[in-house]
Amino acid sequence: MEETNMQIIGHVQTDFPTKFGLPRQSGLIEELVGRIELKPEFRRAEAFRGIEEFSHLWILWQFSLSQKEHWSATVKPPRLGGKKRMGVFATRSPFRPNPIGLSCVRLLDVDYACAKAPVLYVAGVDMVDGTPIYDIKPYLPYADARADAKGGFADAVFSHALKVDFPQELLDKLPKEKQKAAIAFLKQDPRPPYHNRADQVYKIAFDRWDIHFTVEGDRASVCAVHCIRGAER
Protein backbone atom coordinates (compact mmCIF):
# COMPACT_ATOMS: atom_id res chain seq x y z
CA MET A 1 0.00 0.00 0.00
CA GLU A 2 1.28 3.45 -0.86
CA GLU A 3 2.09 5.66 2.12
CA THR A 4 3.00 9.29 2.52
CA ASN A 5 4.04 11.44 5.45
CA MET A 6 2.29 14.67 6.38
CA GLN A 7 3.97 17.41 8.36
CA ILE A 8 2.28 18.91 11.40
CA ILE A 9 2.59 22.67 10.91
CA GLY A 10 1.23 23.77 14.28
CA HIS A 11 -1.33 23.26 17.01
CA VAL A 12 -4.57 24.91 18.10
CA GLN A 13 -5.33 26.10 21.61
CA THR A 14 -8.97 25.81 22.68
CA ASP A 15 -11.06 25.69 25.86
CA PHE A 16 -11.64 21.91 25.68
CA PRO A 17 -8.96 19.67 27.26
CA THR A 18 -11.11 16.60 26.47
CA LYS A 19 -13.52 15.60 23.69
CA PHE A 20 -16.66 15.60 25.86
CA GLY A 21 -18.66 18.75 25.19
CA LEU A 22 -17.09 19.62 21.86
CA PRO A 23 -19.48 20.67 19.07
CA ARG A 24 -20.01 17.79 16.67
CA GLN A 25 -19.20 20.07 13.72
CA SER A 26 -17.29 23.29 13.25
CA GLY A 27 -19.09 26.61 12.95
CA LEU A 28 -22.03 25.61 15.17
CA ILE A 29 -20.87 27.68 18.14
CA GLU A 30 -19.29 30.94 17.02
CA GLU A 31 -18.44 31.85 20.62
CA LEU A 32 -15.84 29.07 20.80
CA VAL A 33 -12.54 30.67 19.84
CA GLY A 34 -9.23 28.98 19.08
CA ARG A 35 -5.66 30.20 18.74
CA ILE A 36 -3.53 28.54 16.04
CA GLU A 37 0.21 28.62 16.71
CA LEU A 38 2.66 27.45 14.07
CA LYS A 39 5.81 25.44 14.62
CA PRO A 40 8.95 27.61 14.36
CA GLU A 41 9.81 26.58 10.80
CA PHE A 42 6.37 27.73 9.58
CA ARG A 43 6.30 31.09 11.37
CA ARG A 44 6.80 33.10 8.21
CA ALA A 45 4.65 36.17 7.71
CA GLU A 46 4.86 35.90 3.93
CA ALA A 47 3.16 32.50 4.08
CA PHE A 48 0.00 34.28 5.30
CA ARG A 49 0.10 37.27 2.96
CA GLY A 50 -3.46 37.99 1.83
CA ILE A 51 -5.19 35.72 4.32
CA GLU A 52 -6.97 38.65 6.02
CA GLU A 53 -9.00 39.11 2.84
CA PHE A 54 -10.90 35.91 3.60
CA SER A 55 -13.65 35.66 6.23
CA HIS A 56 -13.40 31.87 6.71
CA LEU A 57 -10.74 29.18 6.54
CA TRP A 58 -10.59 25.42 6.13
CA ILE A 59 -8.44 23.73 8.78
CA LEU A 60 -7.12 20.22 8.18
CA TRP A 61 -6.14 18.58 11.43
CA GLN A 62 -5.36 15.29 13.15
CA PHE A 63 -7.81 13.27 15.26
CA SER A 64 -5.00 12.86 17.78
CA LEU A 65 -7.26 11.45 20.55
CA SER A 66 -9.22 9.03 18.34
CA GLN A 67 -6.62 6.92 16.59
CA LYS A 68 -7.00 3.14 16.37
CA GLU A 69 -4.68 0.50 15.00
CA HIS A 70 -7.41 -0.87 12.71
CA TRP A 71 -10.25 0.92 10.97
CA SER A 72 -13.84 -0.25 10.51
CA ALA A 73 -15.89 0.02 7.32
CA THR A 74 -18.97 1.04 9.34
CA VAL A 75 -19.48 3.29 12.36
CA LYS A 76 -22.36 4.28 14.63
CA PRO A 77 -23.12 8.02 14.26
CA PRO A 78 -24.10 9.53 17.65
CA ARG A 79 -26.96 11.50 16.12
CA LEU A 80 -28.57 8.24 14.96
CA GLY A 81 -28.70 7.01 18.53
CA GLY A 82 -25.41 5.13 18.42
CA LYS A 83 -27.21 1.97 17.25
CA LYS A 84 -27.49 2.27 13.48
CA ARG A 85 -24.38 1.58 11.41
CA MET A 86 -23.42 3.71 8.42
CA GLY A 87 -20.41 3.58 6.11
CA VAL A 88 -17.40 5.38 7.54
CA PHE A 89 -17.04 7.41 4.34
CA ALA A 90 -20.68 8.51 4.68
CA THR A 91 -19.93 10.05 8.08
CA ARG A 92 -17.50 12.42 9.74
CA SER A 93 -16.49 9.88 12.36
CA PRO A 94 -12.97 10.37 13.79
CA PHE A 95 -12.27 6.64 13.40
CA ARG A 96 -11.06 6.59 9.81
CA PRO A 97 -8.28 4.96 7.78
CA ASN A 98 -6.48 8.31 8.02
CA PRO A 99 -7.31 10.32 11.17
CA ILE A 100 -7.85 13.63 9.36
CA GLY A 101 -10.42 16.20 10.48
CA LEU A 102 -11.79 19.10 8.45
CA SER A 103 -13.20 22.28 9.99
CA CYS A 104 -14.54 25.49 8.52
CA VAL A 105 -13.83 28.36 10.94
CA ARG A 106 -14.21 32.13 10.86
CA LEU A 107 -10.98 34.13 10.82
CA LEU A 108 -11.03 36.74 13.58
CA ASP A 109 -7.49 38.10 13.52
CA VAL A 110 -3.87 37.44 12.63
CA ASP A 111 -1.31 38.61 15.17
CA TYR A 112 1.96 39.48 13.46
CA ALA A 113 3.51 41.17 16.52
CA CYS A 114 3.52 38.48 19.23
CA ALA A 115 6.49 36.29 20.13
CA LYS A 116 5.16 33.31 18.14
CA ALA A 117 3.84 35.34 15.20
CA PRO A 118 2.01 34.89 13.04
CA VAL A 119 -0.79 33.55 15.27
CA LEU A 120 -4.33 33.05 13.94
CA TYR A 121 -7.47 33.56 16.02
CA VAL A 122 -10.50 31.67 14.70
CA ALA A 123 -14.13 31.20 15.79
CA GLY A 124 -16.41 28.18 15.61
CA VAL A 125 -13.77 25.61 16.55
CA ASP A 126 -14.58 21.93 17.21
CA MET A 127 -11.11 20.74 18.26
CA VAL A 128 -9.59 19.79 21.60
CA ASP A 129 -6.77 21.83 23.06
CA GLY A 130 -3.43 20.93 21.47
CA THR A 131 -4.89 19.41 18.28
CA PRO A 132 -2.17 19.07 15.59
CA ILE A 133 -2.77 21.11 12.42
CA TYR A 134 -1.85 19.79 8.97
CA ASP A 135 -2.90 22.66 6.73
CA ILE A 136 -4.79 25.95 6.43
CA LYS A 137 -6.72 26.90 3.28
CA PRO A 138 -9.07 29.78 2.45
CA TYR A 139 -12.80 29.09 2.22
CA LEU A 140 -14.06 30.11 -1.22
CA PRO A 141 -17.82 30.85 -1.29
CA TYR A 142 -18.12 30.47 -5.06
CA ALA A 143 -16.66 26.97 -4.95
CA ASP A 144 -17.31 25.68 -1.42
CA ALA A 145 -20.94 26.75 -0.87
CA ARG A 146 -23.55 24.64 -2.69
CA ALA A 147 -27.12 25.90 -2.29
CA ASP A 148 -28.59 22.70 -3.74
CA ALA A 149 -26.51 20.30 -1.62
CA LYS A 150 -28.27 17.51 0.30
CA GLY A 151 -27.28 16.60 3.85
CA GLY A 152 -28.32 12.95 3.79
CA PHE A 153 -29.32 11.35 7.08
CA ALA A 154 -27.64 14.20 8.97
CA ASP A 155 -30.40 16.64 7.97
CA ALA A 156 -33.01 14.67 9.89
CA VAL A 157 -31.21 14.96 13.22
CA PHE A 158 -29.54 18.38 12.99
CA SER A 159 -32.38 20.21 14.77
CA HIS A 160 -32.04 18.22 18.01
CA ALA A 161 -31.40 20.61 20.91
CA LEU A 162 -31.88 20.81 24.66
CA LYS A 163 -33.33 23.60 26.75
CA VAL A 164 -30.72 24.74 29.29
CA ASP A 165 -31.27 25.81 32.91
CA PHE A 166 -28.06 27.53 34.00
CA PRO A 167 -28.63 29.29 37.35
CA GLN A 168 -27.24 32.83 37.24
CA GLU A 169 -25.11 32.34 40.36
CA LEU A 170 -23.38 29.41 38.64
CA LEU A 171 -23.14 31.13 35.27
CA ASP A 172 -21.45 34.10 36.93
CA LYS A 173 -18.56 31.83 37.92
CA LEU A 174 -17.51 31.87 34.27
CA PRO A 175 -16.05 34.96 32.55
CA LYS A 176 -18.74 36.87 30.68
CA GLU A 177 -17.05 36.21 27.34
CA LYS A 178 -17.39 32.43 27.88
CA GLN A 179 -20.96 32.28 29.18
CA LYS A 180 -22.74 32.15 25.81
CA ALA A 181 -20.44 29.38 24.61
CA ALA A 182 -21.13 27.30 27.74
CA ILE A 183 -24.89 27.53 27.23
CA ALA A 184 -24.52 26.81 23.50
CA PHE A 185 -22.59 23.54 23.84
CA LEU A 186 -25.00 22.29 26.50
CA LYS A 187 -27.89 22.97 24.10
CA GLN A 188 -26.33 20.58 21.60
CA ASP A 189 -26.65 17.68 24.06
CA PRO A 190 -23.05 16.46 24.43
CA ARG A 191 -24.04 13.15 26.02
CA PRO A 192 -23.27 9.83 24.35
CA PRO A 193 -26.44 8.62 22.58
CA TYR A 194 -26.87 5.63 24.89
CA HIS A 195 -26.93 7.82 28.03
CA ASN A 196 -30.46 8.84 29.03
CA ARG A 197 -30.66 8.49 32.81
CA ALA A 198 -32.16 11.51 34.55
CA ASP A 199 -30.12 10.85 37.73
CA GLN A 200 -26.77 10.78 35.93
CA VAL A 201 -24.52 13.79 36.61
CA TYR A 202 -22.27 14.66 33.67
CA LYS A 203 -19.14 16.79 33.77
CA ILE A 204 -17.63 18.89 30.99
CA ALA A 205 -14.12 20.35 31.32
CA PHE A 206 -14.29 23.85 29.85
CA ASP A 207 -11.18 26.02 30.05
CA ARG A 208 -10.42 26.24 33.80
CA TRP A 209 -13.82 25.00 34.94
CA ASP A 210 -15.74 21.78 35.35
CA ILE A 211 -19.43 22.18 34.54
CA HIS A 212 -21.71 19.57 36.12
CA PHE A 213 -25.20 18.99 34.71
CA THR A 214 -28.08 16.54 34.47
CA VAL A 215 -30.54 15.91 31.62
CA GLU A 216 -34.20 15.00 31.98
CA GLY A 217 -36.27 14.81 28.83
CA ASP A 218 -35.27 17.73 26.63
CA ARG A 219 -33.86 19.87 29.45
CA ALA A 220 -30.29 20.17 30.74
CA SER A 221 -29.84 21.56 34.26
CA VAL A 222 -26.49 22.80 35.51
CA CYS A 223 -25.95 21.84 39.15
CA ALA A 224 -22.35 22.91 39.85
CA VAL A 225 -19.42 24.86 38.38
CA HIS A 226 -15.95 24.30 39.84
CA CYS A 227 -12.73 26.08 39.01
CA ILE A 228 -10.03 23.40 39.05
CA ARG A 229 -7.32 24.72 36.72
CA GLY A 230 -5.84 27.91 38.16
CA ALA A 231 -7.09 30.35 40.75
CA GLU A 232 -10.60 31.72 40.92
CA ARG A 233 -11.10 35.09 39.32
Image (cartoon, rainbow, N blue to C red):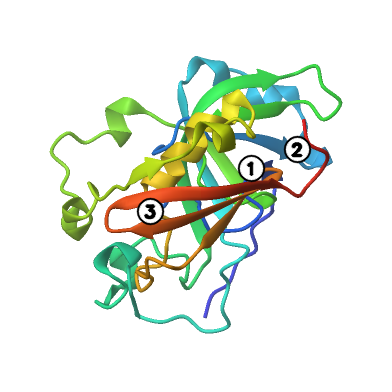
Give the residue number, with chain letter if any, for mark 3. 189
Work out whether residue 210 can be spotted.
yes
Disc 2 residue type (three-letter): Phe
Write down the quadrant of residue 154 in the picture. bottom left
- Relative placement, left or right, of 142 versus 120 is left
Q: Nearer the viewer, residue 183 or 50?
A: 183
Secondary structure beneath dot 2 equals helix
Q: Is residue 3 above or below residue 210?
A: below
Secondary structure beneath dot 1 equals loop
Q: Is residue 59 above or below residue 153?
A: above
Write down the quadrant of residue 43 in the picture. top right
Residue 175 image offset from top left, x and y in percent: 64, 28
Placement of the C terminus among the 4 image quadrants = top right
Q: Residue at x 17, y 33 (%)?
A: 147
Give the residue number, with chain letter if any, for mark 2. 42
Disc 1 residue type (three-letter): Asp
> Which disc is residue 15 wearing?
1
- Relative placement, left or right, of 157 versus 95 is left
- Relative placement, left or right, of 72 versus 82 is right
Q: Residue at x 51, y 39 (%)?
A: 182
Cα distance in 3D space between marks 2 and 1: 24 Å
> Which disc is residue 71 wearing?
none
Q: Earlier in the sequence, mark 3 or mark 2?
A: 2
Disc 3 residue type (three-letter): Asp
Seen from this angle, which residue lies furthest left? Answer: 148
Q: Marks 1 and 3: which is nearer the front?
A: 3
**Within-10-Å neighbours for mark 1: few <14, some 14–19, many 20+:** some
**Within-10-Å neighbours for mark 3: few <14, some 14–19, many 20+:** many
Residue 35 image offset from top left, x and y in percent: 66, 34
Work out whether residue 26 can be spotted.
no
